Amino acid sequence: MEKEAWKDRILGSLEGAKRAEPDPSLYDGIRARLNATGPVAQMHVVRRPYLALAAAFLVLLLTANIWALTQRYPEKSAAPNTSIYQLYAANFDLY
Amino acid sequence: MNESLLHRELLAQIALGSEPALKQLYDLFKSRVYNTALSYLQNPAEAEEVTQDVFVNIYRSAVRFEGKSSVNTWVYRIAVNLSLDRLNYRNRRKRFGFLVGLPDDAEQPPHFDHPGVLLEQKENARILFQAIQSLPGQQKTAFILSFVEDLPRQEVADVMELSLKAVESLLQRAKANLRKQLDNFFPGRRI
């Protein structure tokens, strides 16, 4: 009972509150940002450097994988040369 | 001139690039925007940054205002969205900072004292703001707009682009969740 009354007092504690006011010089900052060139794009990049890092890491990983695959299965050398087989057949003739 | 008409007129001038009109709109809306941002972020420096973002955003997107809602609703919507963006950014940064050991650039003070709250209510309001932080996004928005900004329910519904019934349901759930949260703050509770 006491607890519920206490909760009611907490929930009603904003009654009669006034709005908070920002610093009087805040508009100067807005004007400065409006006069600067491309602040939004710049801010976006600076705010999320870890996204750029993650993207760079993914690109690096992808490139390394493609390189590893091309090393393992080179296009030209993968196709067997029939003339070499014929040579082996001649050298190791079992019959 | 009617208040709503004045807002629209100012926005039309801002759309044409008028900075004096932006200053006039800023003077009319600065405390609503700042107070909303402060209620979400509970940090004056971050709330001022968001207030700046809101007015820069208004200046750049005034030309796209279609007049489907009032300017008041539109400005509140921008303030709410940018405050939530900032909260998400802060949470992401906290998680990422925890993983890679980055310092937290927006050190959160342990207690938030809203400057507009009556002196005799400061202690209770401090507890309430701590509990508000635990609410899910939509419940938090409905509660802040209704009880901190003191907007009529219909206006809250317009800002959130929900029905009146949905806002009332969100407020009910927000209050129930806050009551649950307040159990943790009750003086002399058993641990």
Image (spheres, coloured by chain):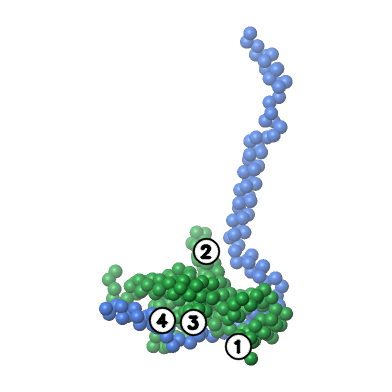
Chain colours: A blue, B green
Question: Mark 3 or mark 2, which is nearer the start of the sequence?
Answer: 2
Amino acid under disc 2: Arg
Disc 3 + disc 1, Cβ < 8 Å: no
Instruction: Tell us which disc is closer to us: 2 or 3.
Output: 3
Q: Secondary structure at mark 3?
A: loop
Residue visible at 37% across and 72% down? B176
Q: Residue A44's mark?
A: none
Question: Mark 4 or mark 1, which is nearer the start of the sequence?
Answer: 1
**Disc 2 versus disc 3: distance between alpha carbons?**
33 Å
Question: Mark 4 or mark 2, which is nearer the start of the sequence?
Answer: 2
- Residue beneath disc 2: B92
- Residue beneath disc 3: B152
Residue B61 location (% of width, % of height): 66, 74
**Disc 3 versus disc 1: distance between alpha carbons?**
17 Å
How would you rate the neighbour count of disc 2 (Cα within 10 Å): few for under 14, some for 14-19, many for 20 or more?
few
Chain of the residue where label 3 is placed in the rendered structure: B
Q: Residue B125's mark?
A: 4
Q: Secondary structure at mark 2?
A: helix
Report whether mark 2 lies on the same chain as mark 4.
yes
The one of A20 and B65 positioned closer to us in this rendering: B65
Q: Residue B3's mark?
A: 1
